[in-house]
Amino acid sequence: VSSALEARREQSLGTCWYLYGVVPASSAPDERFDWPSVTATGQVDVLGEGTLAAVVTPAPAVDFDQPGLDAHLQDAAWLESKIRAHEQVLERVLAHSSVLPFRFCTIYRSEESVRGFLRERRAELEAALGQLAGRVELGVKAFADRKRLAHRLGSGVQDEGLGEGESGGRAYLERRLAEQRSADDLERVALELVEAWHEELMAHAAAGTFLRLQTPEASGRPDDMLMNAAYLVEANDRGFIDAVAALRGEYEALGIVFELTGPWPPYNFVPDEAGTG
Amino acid sequence: LSSRDLTSYRAGDLSDGQPAQLADVLERVLDKGIVIAGDIQVNLLDIELLTIKLRLLIASADKAKELGIDWWEGDAFLSSRGERQALEERVRRLEEERGIEGETASSALGERSER
């Protein structure tokens, strides 16, 4: 493959603008020289337009416009690297600013087109950013070895040192355990536990949502996933993290493990009205 | 966790310095976030199918291979619309069977029991 030919093709096709997300112009990140991007050499730029700014990368149209893009979208390795780059850029942005994350592969053909978008949708974008201001998304997952959990529940939790606690969750669990023994009951108890955890965490969150449960291949843990949830929390409030720590302490003896991820750009909490119009 | 303010965390810090699990990234970057069509029309059928395939891959690489969906090893997307629809149907059925489509914790503990 001739790189000169490649370069000429690139030149003739020009540049397009890959949009990662929108931030308030006042908090847009200004030092981005060592950032990753969706292109091999391209940098992350900020296009300010009034009160808003778009976080973009000028990208070769040969890769990010048709037909090149269509071909790339069939290439799993390409996809994974670009999807990860998209996420990493937004994570960097999040360290500086509130951010409205956009879905993978939102692409414009000119800088002016991006600016036009910011002007046209200003009201909705500002409203959406207002709702997310100062907030981040945290992920909470809970895992347990199903057989081990069943065994512990079935053989009485006192043996595991759970008996002395008076805290609500454990007392509740013990009561339930006295009644429930079959696998079906175990399932029901687990669902009730997840609901109880969710309720406790919601006390420290502005919003919360359940995500799909993942298999061990996806989660990277051998245990069964009991809960996969995302929460929108105030970035400077430790109450949520303390609540997760409390759950960890409370359920450790049962072999239940809580995993906290993030802070994520608030993907799961972008207001609907900003998303589809 | 330290007593630092969350604001002093860099994104991802809560994951103990580990890179985010691909599954966690996919379920956000591909499934969520603002969708406003840019200038370039990404083939929605492709993305849709891709998302389904990625989900399936997450659910079980072995199962996907068994079905001949080893696209990550380089095979092209199926060529005709009919084939795609057939595949989508198949994937949806499989997802339903495996209970990985649900948004709630309805399949907690992995093996869902019949009610």
Image (tube, grey):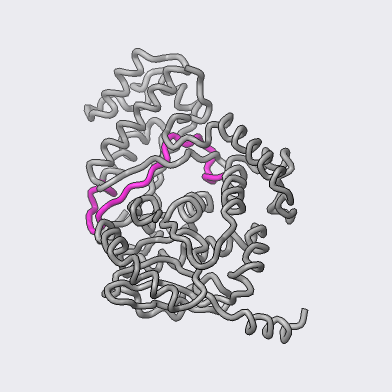
**Could you tell me if residue A263 is visible in this image?**
no
Q: Which residues are magenta?
A: A218-242
Q: Residue at coordinates 39% horizontally, 69% vertically from top-left?
A: A117
Q: Which quarter of the figure is the N terminus of chain A placed in?
A: bottom right
Q: Position of residue A101 (x, y in %)?
A: 40, 61
A168 horizontally vs B69: left or right: left
Q: Which quadrant would residue A248 be assigned to in this image?
A: top left
A26 horizontally vs A29: left or right: left
Q: Which quarter of the figure is the C terminus of chain A placed in?
A: bottom left
Which of the two residues, B92 or A188, is positioned nearer the viewer here? Answer: B92
Is A223 magenta? The answer is yes
Q: Residue at coordinates 34% horizontally, 78% vertically from top-left?
A: A48
Q: Position of residue A188 (x, y in %)?
A: 40, 22
Q: Which quadrant would residue B52 be assigned to in this image?
A: top right
Which of the two residues, A104 or A273, is positioned nearer the viewer here? Answer: A273
Is A60 magenta? The answer is no
Q: Residue at coordinates 45% horizontally, 73% vertically from top-left?
A: A56
**Could you tell me if residue A202 is visible in this image?**
yes
